[in-house]
Amino acid sequence: MLAAMSATPLPPRSPGAACARSGGDACPGTLRLHRADDGALARIRIPGGVLTAEGAEALGRAAERFGDGELHLTSRGNVQLRGLAEEDAPDLAALLGGAGLLPSERHERVRNVVASPLSGLDGHGAADVGPWLTGLDHLICGSDRATALSGRFLFALDDGRGDVDALGADLTLIARDDGGAMLRVGATDTVLTVPAADGPRAALLAAGTFLDAARDTGAWRLKDLPAGVAAALPGEVLRRLRKSGTDAVTARHPRPVAARGPVPGQVAASALAVDVPLGRLGAGQWRLLSSADGLRLTPWRGAVVTGVASGRADGLLGDLASAGLITGPDSGWAGVGACVGRPGCAKSLADVRAQAAAAVGPPGRLPVYWSGCERRCGHPHGEWIDVVATPGGHHITHVRGDRSDTPVAVGNDPGALAAAVASARGPRIP
């Protein structure tokens, strides 16, 4: 059992948690590859996770032609290709650019936008955020100023259901039931209400306001700003919006607490949702997911297949399950995540993907995330079980938002580790 909660602040969990830039922005992209232990790595930004059939087919070809044959989903609904040869970078860019996945070379690393993946599909939410997504991406790619944003800065477009609002983006645009929009600047509960049509422009204006505030602070993201500067930022955004002619006011809208992503399965007559074990997709799995008219990748390392032909949903769902994807909450893989670990990452202390697979059992109440080191790359938000490799074994911690229990140390014995993780997660509530 885990120790009683001690209200210990959670330590920094990602490279972006530092408050000062130690050098240039090293985030990988399509044009700038990252050298990893298993070869070069490319990160392809896919705003909102939305892919056309042509774009999905191009990504599959790129993984097989240039990479390790797998597509690795990220916690921002993007795709990473691993095992690349650096000399193949120009051909990779040409292939992806030809499929519309590289609309601006100068902006490709700053097109970091997550969106409610079921928006407009399942009848929930206050509005379809699709027009916002198209509009914001167009504005970003047309802005010289936006090129100064780091590859870590994140926009979120929430259709009112609270799913991506809970992810802690730098700027979150939220649909209202009355047809308006709210703009959350950072982690505050104070939001700015604006006309829905002005939402994308307001978000980009807020990003520019952040760049001005971050000057000489070394901040990559809003959470890196000095406390006083961060507290004053929403007021400055409000002032600039009004000066630009936008009818903006302040309001209160508490942030939701994230737990899991969408439950997999059939979400509409023409759409299917699945999760992907550890975010890794082989060529055959990717072809299945790409077999309909469109695909939406989720910030929970899953996918929503859209445009499924009438009468094909049940058959396709069965095929996806047979291919090893998660099509319902009863899978032992539901809620299980991990960073890349060894051998792909030099900083990792363990092959955490293999350890996570060995520990899979009955589905648990809480998500669990396995990290190879204290950086916890790609960790979830909200309430979850944190498993971190250490030189002598693992630390297991129950995390609740920005607070955590006292970690419990567990050795490397696979049986003891699996039992400790299962106990920490608790049984799934039917």
Image: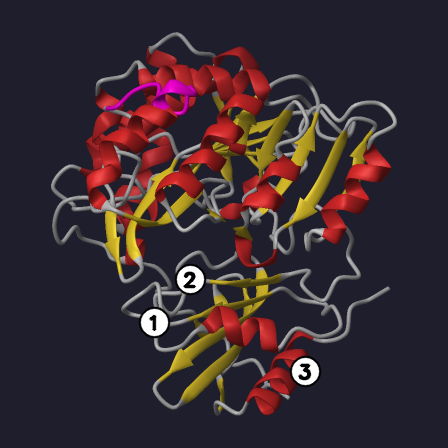
Residue tagged by mark 2?
Answer: 340
* N-term-proximal mark, 3 vs 1: 1
From where the camera sits, is residue 74 visible?
A: no
Name the residue nearer the viewer: 226 or 160.
160
Q: Is residue 104 magenta?
A: yes
Three-letter code for the amino acid on which mark 2 is drawn: Val
- Residue at left offset 62%, top offset 45%: 285
Label 3 element class? helix
In this picture, which residue range is highlighted in magenta?
A: 97-105
Residue tagged by mark 3?
Answer: 423
* N-term-proximal mark, 2 vs 3: 2
Query: How much space separates mark 2 and mark 3, taking CA atoms?
Result: 24 Å
User: Where does the image place residue 423, in percent across and percent down from the top left?
Assistant: 68, 82
User: Where does the image place residue 204, in percent across and percent down from the top left?
Assistant: 36, 22
In the rendered view, would you say 61 is above or below 9? Answer: above
Label 2 element class? loop
User: Where does the image place residue 17, in percent across and percent down from the top left?
Assistant: 31, 57
Image check: 185 left or right of 404? left
- Residue at left offset 35%, top offset 71%: 374
Label 1 element class? loop
Query: How much space separates mark 3 and mark 1, taking CA atoms?
Result: 25 Å
- Quarter of the image with the C terminus is bottom right
Three-letter code for the amino acid on which mark 3 is drawn: Ser
Q: How crowded is the residue under tag 3: few (<14 C-alpha within 10 Å), some, or many (20+)?
A: few
